[in-house]
């Protein structure tokens, strides 16, 4: 075993099972391990590295800001923070923003804002939704294995069946503060919401006066072939939560809210020491600029289509889900498939015993998509050997 794996086993809290690779370097869509072997990265740091590894445009902006100013806290005004909030306003259509360091923190803030604005306590989430690991976000995360050992969490929370209008109607009531939803469930294995179902959430919002929170931590910033998954559905939430690819892997997230919801906020309701520091905001601004200037939202749509067309031709593929470069694939034996791909220089993430997820950098080229498809196709011949 690689000596670094042994060292890790002795000193690291063992929350994660890792792939047996020591990654040392990245370039574009490729990762290089300690033995110099290269892998096409279809995981992208779990849907984060959207403009590619070692992106020179981004790195130059970060370096420049690093030399100027890293951190002063939210006690002061800084230009990158204000510019980033203006940029997010332009691309999300929400009005006001607060910055965080991760997805789970964005969800924490969103839940607090919803309670503050509505004065109501109850949250409705969905079976198989994932919203993070801190106590509030965990309370609205479905998986019992993640949630139950840490009870009591915040209450009341009701989980409705995803895509079931009946179940949704039973879950919401006058006590509901907010419905939080992943429009495309990412961690569960890429399961999109149906349009009628999303429409019904908004009809019920009118009746019961709750807020709608779209958790776009995973779906944001071009991943789905639209800037945000909400553009696919044509609905605007009261609150949006963002993180992951917002800074290409640099830890930065955001909560976006409407002007109306901002009316319920008081100074001191929430805070963060690091949230929105000039370095993180510069990383995010440069990431967004790079996506814009290189038409990566369009590339996400086109390369997603190329993947889908290629996958449809593979006999063992049972099911293809998702939008753009957020693709869930039923392959039968996900572990064996993933191991075969790794041997052949392609990294994918198994989301269940039978499903894998394809979430590469949005910079991926058609040659790279074809490289991945060829490796996938070779699984059939390797099985018959
Ligand atoms: C939809 C969604 N929300 C929230 C989170 C939590 O984000 P983080 O791991 O940055 O705390 C994730 C992470 O996978 C996510 O996919």
Image (cartoon, helix red, strand yellow):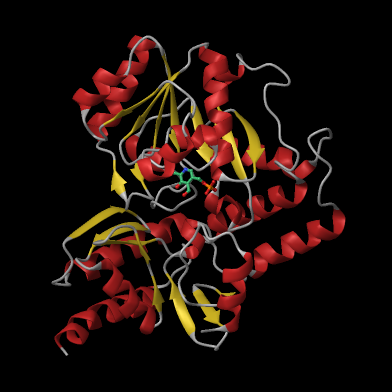
Look at the image and tell me whether residue 193 can be seen. Answer: yes
> Residue most toward the right?
68
Q: Position of residue 29 (x, y in %)?
A: 49, 72
Residue 173 vertical position relative to residue 22 in the rendered view, above or below: above
Q: Position of residue 234 (x, y in %)?
A: 35, 33
In the rendered view, does 63 fall on the left or right side of 86? right
Residue 276 vertical position relative to residue 370 in the rendered view, above or below: above
At 34% across and 22% down in the image, what residue appears?
202
At 34% across and 77% down in the image, what residue appears?
339
Quadrant occupied by the C terminus: bottom left
Q: How many marks?
A: 0
In the rendered view, does 83 fall on the left or right side of 9? right
Q: Position of residue 72 (x, y in %)?
A: 84, 42
At 71% across and 36% down in the image, what residue appears?
272
Residue 37 vertical position relative to residue 289 in the rendered view, above or below: below
Q: Position of residue 253 (x, y in %)?
A: 60, 44
Look at the image and tell me whether residue 143 can be seen. Answer: no
| Residue nearest the observer in this picture, 122 or 181 | 122
In the rendered view, does 61 fall on the left or right side of 365? right
Quadrant location of residue 196?
top left
| Residue nearest the observer in this picture, 263 or 217 | 217
Residue 246 vertical position relative to residue 164 in the rendered view, above or below: below
């Amino acid at each position: 075993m690689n000596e670094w794996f042994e060292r890790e086993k002795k000193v690291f809290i063992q929350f994660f099972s890792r792939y047996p690779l020591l990654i040392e370097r990245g370039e574009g869509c490729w990762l290089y391990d300690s033995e110099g072997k290269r892998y096409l990265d279809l995981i992208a740091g779990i849907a984060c590295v959207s403009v590619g590894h070692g992106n020179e445009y981004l790195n130059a902006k970060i370096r420049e800001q690093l030399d100027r100013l890293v951190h002063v806290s939210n006690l002061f005004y800084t230009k990158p923070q204000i510019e980033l909030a203006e940029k997010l306003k332009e691309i999300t259509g929400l009005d006001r923003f607060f910055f965080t360091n991760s997805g789970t923190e964005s969800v924490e803030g969103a839940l607090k804002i919803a309670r503050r604005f509505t004065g109501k306590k109850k949250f409705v989430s969905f079976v198989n939704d994932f919203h993070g690991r801190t106590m509030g976000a965990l309370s609205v995360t479905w998986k019992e294995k993640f949630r139950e050992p840490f009870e009591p969490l915040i209450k009341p929370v009701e989980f409705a069946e995803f895509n079931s209008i009946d179940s949704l109607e039973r879950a919401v009531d006058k006590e509901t503060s907010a419905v939080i939803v992943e429009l495309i469930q990412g961690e569960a294995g890429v399961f999109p919401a149906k349009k009628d179902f999303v429409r019904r959430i908004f009809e019920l919002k009118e009746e019961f006066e709750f807020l709608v929170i779209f958790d776009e931590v995973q779906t944001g910033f071009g991943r789905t072939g639209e800037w945000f998954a909400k553009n696919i559905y044509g609905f605007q939430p009261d609150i949006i939560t963002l993180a992951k690819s917002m800074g290409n892997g640099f830890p930065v997230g955001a909560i976006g809210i409407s002007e109306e919801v901002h009316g319920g906020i008081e100074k001191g309701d929430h805070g963060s020491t690091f949230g929105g520091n000039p370095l993180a905001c510069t990383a995010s601004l440069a990431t967004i600029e790079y996506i814009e200037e290189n038409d990566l939202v369009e590339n996400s749509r086109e390369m997603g289509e190329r993947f889908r067309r290629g996958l449809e031709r593979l006999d063992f593929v049972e099911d293809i889900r998702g939008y753009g470069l957020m693709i869930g694939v039923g392959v039968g034996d996900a572990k064996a498939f993933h191991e075969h791909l790794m041997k052949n220089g392609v990294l994918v993430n198994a989301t269940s015993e039978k499903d894998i997820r394809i979430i590469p950098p949005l910079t991926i080229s058609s040659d790279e998509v074809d490289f991945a498809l060829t490796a996938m196709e070779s699984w059939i011949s390797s099985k018959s050997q």
